[in-house]
DNA sequence: CGAGTATACATTGCATGCAATCGCCCTTCG
DNA sequence: CGAAGGGCGATTGCATGCAATGTATACTCG
């Protein structure tokens, strides 16, 4: 998974500031810090067992990325409005279409290792299996892994980084929407169409399949827990 | 209707950490801190008259954005390799095509204020005038303003933010390449084609014109000062 | 004279302290 | 009963100190 690469955004940073950053993102993803919840430096620092300084740096990055927003006194976990989600999916559709096109182009030129393509097929199978278990978390995980693999196959580190940003922003409030059986059935078919286009080295086919897939995902998207009532205190002050 | 400004990346932050961040970016843009140059927290802090703490935060953000890279002892100003530039222009072409398409769509739906379109025309004129003065800095500035206006006209804050990131990354080492008279002449024509497509409300025309324009810009791009003094070479790009 | 090694030092990374700021709540007045 | 104002407290923002770490230099030995 770590085929790095050109310096676009450094991944393997040491230090607890980066650890805090990763930890916070993880808490967002698993909903432990819910959208709208307020974060205070002291509470996070106590939670993670570090001082406020690395927490400050991590929050600064999250603020720059839009994963948290300025709140009354400090920051709050960002929530996605319906309009924001719509805009994100428009961008995402174009980016994923480009990724599929580039991957197909690399395949046509023989620049894509066969192992990578086989990995795509396995990833599609994994999503299908996960969806059938009706495990939302595992499905989201497998789905993300597939899309990540396509992004990596494109061979453009800046595109890959941009895709990660978009996914992160969407994943803050989303898990795969499996309630709709029609969508759950269509997802694998659409995934296969993308991979087939890549395998065939057909950029147009792969790109349009990817675009259609993301647009369908955008239509199926329902903002999870849109408005959790406010004032979920940070961590319990244990008072 | 006035839609509340979506928080994608907070712009007007107070505090000297943000001021340091802006100041550093400005120094990069005007070449005062050249690519490959090493930055130490203490030196920057002394230069800007603050302590190391806000400098640390600013450098952390620049590191996350890829504008500086980890160096032997701290960080160095990032330089663009030819391969990186190529990848950036591929991404940029797609993003700007999307922006032009969305702007044209908004125009077709009557959602784009006529004043905005007139502003696009004026921006095109401004670029033309600046190019004729052979002032590289002014030309780059005017060109960026035009592209920014198109990005804003698209009405998608996430796309706009992503475009800014790409522009920033390219602008680190680039000014408009005016040496090529053929390119200098074609630039205004291409700009007009994009704006014409938007004004006509024709997404396909606007998008393809934008894509062609950026691809031409990518071909005309020559990495300014391609001296690579072994800065990024701490990790081997074993590609 | 070159290579290997030890040492000193520049520099980062984090914690802590202190002052400034802003929201919240309680009080007070209309 | 509602609104305005003031004080208190929570929280941020920045500076500084100290320890850890990796680099570059100087030194020694072959």
Image: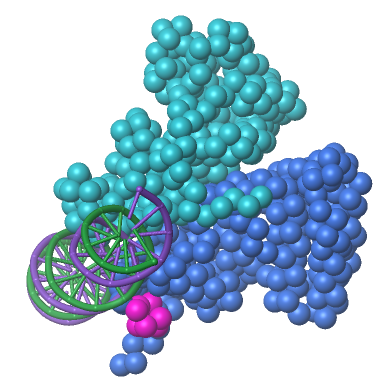
Chain colours: A blue, B cyan, C purple, D green
Give the residue drawn at x 62%, y 65%.
A171
Q: Residue B44 or A49: which is nearer the viewer?
A: B44
* Residue A170 covered by magenta stretch: no
By secondary structure, the bulk of the magenta-drawn segment is best described as: helix
Q: Is D27 located above or below residue A163 in the figure? A: below
Give the residue drawn at x 51%, y 18%.
B177
Please give left or right for residue B77 compared with residue B44 in the image: right
Give the residue drawn at x 45%, y 28%.
B225
Q: Is residue B121 visible?
A: yes
Image-quadrant location for residue A225: bottom right
* Residue B40 drawn at (x, y percent): 28, 51
Give the residue drawn at x 43%, y 72%.
A20
* Residue A44 covered by magenta stretch: yes
* Residue A99 drawn at (x, y percent): 73, 47
Q: Residue B199 or B14: which is nearer the viewer?
A: B14
Q: Is A220 located above or below residue A51 in the figure? A: above
Q: Is A167 located above or below residue C13 in the figure? A: above
Q: Which segment is the magenta one?
A: A43-50
Please give left or right for residue B114 compared with residue A100 in the image: left
Q: Is residue A187 visible?
A: no
* Residue B112 drawn at (x, y percent): 58, 30
How many numbered marks have been drawn onto this rendered protein structure? 0
* Residue A17 drawn at (x, y percent): 39, 68
Image-quadrant location for residue B194: top right
């Amino acid at each position: 998974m770590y085929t790095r690469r050109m310096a676009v955004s450094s991944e393997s940073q040491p230090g607890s500031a980066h650890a805090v950053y990763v930890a916070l993102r993880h808490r967002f993803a698993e909903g432990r810090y819910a959208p709208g919840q307020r974060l205070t430096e002291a509470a996070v620092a106590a939670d993670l067992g570090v001082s406020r300084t690395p927490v400050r740096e991590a929050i600064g990055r999250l603020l720059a990325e839009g994963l948290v927003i300025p709140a009354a006194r400090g920051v709050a976990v960002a929530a996605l409005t319906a309009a924001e989600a719509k805009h994100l999916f428009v961008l995402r559709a174009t980016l994923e279409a480009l990724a599929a096109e580039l991957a197909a182009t690399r395949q046509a030129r023989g620049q894509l290792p066969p192992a990578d393509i086989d990995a795509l097929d396995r990833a599609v199978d994994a999503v299908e299996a996960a969806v059938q278990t009706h495990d939302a978390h595992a499905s989201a995980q497998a789905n993300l892994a597939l899309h990540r693999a396509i992004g990596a196959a494109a061979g453009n580190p800046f595109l890959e980084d941009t895709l990660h940003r978009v996914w992160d922003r969407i994943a803050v409030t989303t898990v795969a929407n499996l309630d709709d059986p029609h969508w759950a059935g269509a997802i694998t078919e659409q995934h296969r169409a993308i991979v087939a286009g890549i395998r065939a080295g057909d950029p147009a086919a792969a790109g349009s399949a990817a675009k259609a897939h993301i647009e369908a995902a955008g239509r199926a998207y329902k903002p999870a827990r849109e408005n959790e009532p406010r004032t979920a205190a940070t961590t319990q002050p244990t008072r």
